[in-house]
Image (cartoon, grey):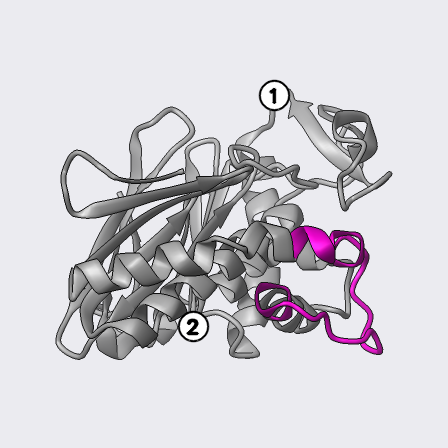
Amino acid sequence: MAAILPCGTRLHLQHGPIDLIIGAEGARAAAFAAARARFETVLEELVAELAFLRTEVSADDPAPQGAVARRMDKSARAHSAGFVTRMAAVAGAVADEILTAMTKAAPLSRAYVNNGGDIALHLAPGHGFATAIAGLDGHENGRITIRAEDGIGGIATSGRGGRSLSMGIADAVTVLARDAASADVAATLIANAVDLPGHPAIHRLPASEIDPESDLKNRLITNGYGALSLPEIHDALQNGRIVAEKMVRRGLIASACLFLRGETCHAGADRLAPTSGVLEHA
C-alpha cells in the first residue's frame, strides 16, 4: 500500500510487517517517488535471506547479499562479542535504505522515515528536528531536539512496549546514533540489559513459546513482572546504563535514555553540548 496521508505532506508505505511514515521538505514529490520505487522489493529481498538474518552473528560469517541485509549485518557485527542477530537492526535498516533512496533522488532540507518508531533522519546544514518520547501510557516521557551539526541520523526505541520481544524489563530505551540501524540494534541490547537476573517477580519464558519463528529461539524473554522496590528499579536501570555507556565510549551511539516505572537515566548526554542532540526527560 502507498498513499499520501490527509495532511498532504507525508507518505504512508506498508507491505507485510513493514509500515513506514515518511516526511520530506524540499523536492518532496521526487523524494516520495524514489521512496515508493525502492520500497517495492525491500520485503522480498529480506525474505530471501531471512533464515540467515535470524541466526546469531559471528565475526567470521559471510556478508549477506541484499542492501538492507548488509546494513543490518554491519550494525549487528559491532556488537558480536555478545548474543545478537541481524534482526535486531531490521526496522532501522529498512528506514535507512528508504531515506538513502530519497536523498539520492532529490535535494531535501529535512526528511525522515519512521518505521514503527525507529527513525532514519536527514538534516541539511542549518536545519533541526524535534520529537517527543511517548511512554507506555501515552504520556510524554521527554523530548529530543537534534541539529544537523550533531551528526545524528537515527533514533530508535526498544523495550517491553515495542513490537519485538525483550529479554529485559525496560519500559523503553531510546537511542540516538549516526544511523537508524545502529540506533535500533543498540536500543535492543540496552533494553535487554535493563534487568534483574534471577529476580522472583520477573516472569520469563522461551521466546519460541510466544513466537515459534523468533530469532531468539529458546532464549528467555520477559513475559511480565510484579512489584519492584525503588532501589531494584535503579539497579535495573544502572545495568542498562553500563551497557549504554560502553557503546558511547566505543562511538557506536551518541546518547541513550532509559525508562522503567517512572524512573529515568541517561547515558552519553554529558558528551553532547546542552543545545545539541541531548535527550531531555520531563
Q: Earlier in the sequence, mark 2 or mark 1?
A: 2
Q: Amino acid at mark 2?
A: Arg
Q: Residue at x 77, y 63 (%)?
A: 82
Judged from the image, the secondary structure of the residue bearing numbered disc 1 is: loop
Image x and y of residue 43, in percent: 58, 50
Judged from the image, the secondary structure of the residue bearing numbered disc 2 is: loop
Q: Is residue 281 above or below residue 139?
A: below
Q: Amino acid at mark 1?
A: Ala
Would residue 84 be found to the left or right of residue 253 on screen? right
Q: Quadrant of the N terminus?
A: top left
Q: Residue at x 55, y 37 (%)?
A: 16
- Magenta segment range? 46-70
Q: CA distance from mark 2 to mark 1?
A: 37 Å
Q: Which mark is residue 227?
A: 1
Quarter of the figure with residue 221: top right
Q: Is residue 226 above or below residue 51?
A: above
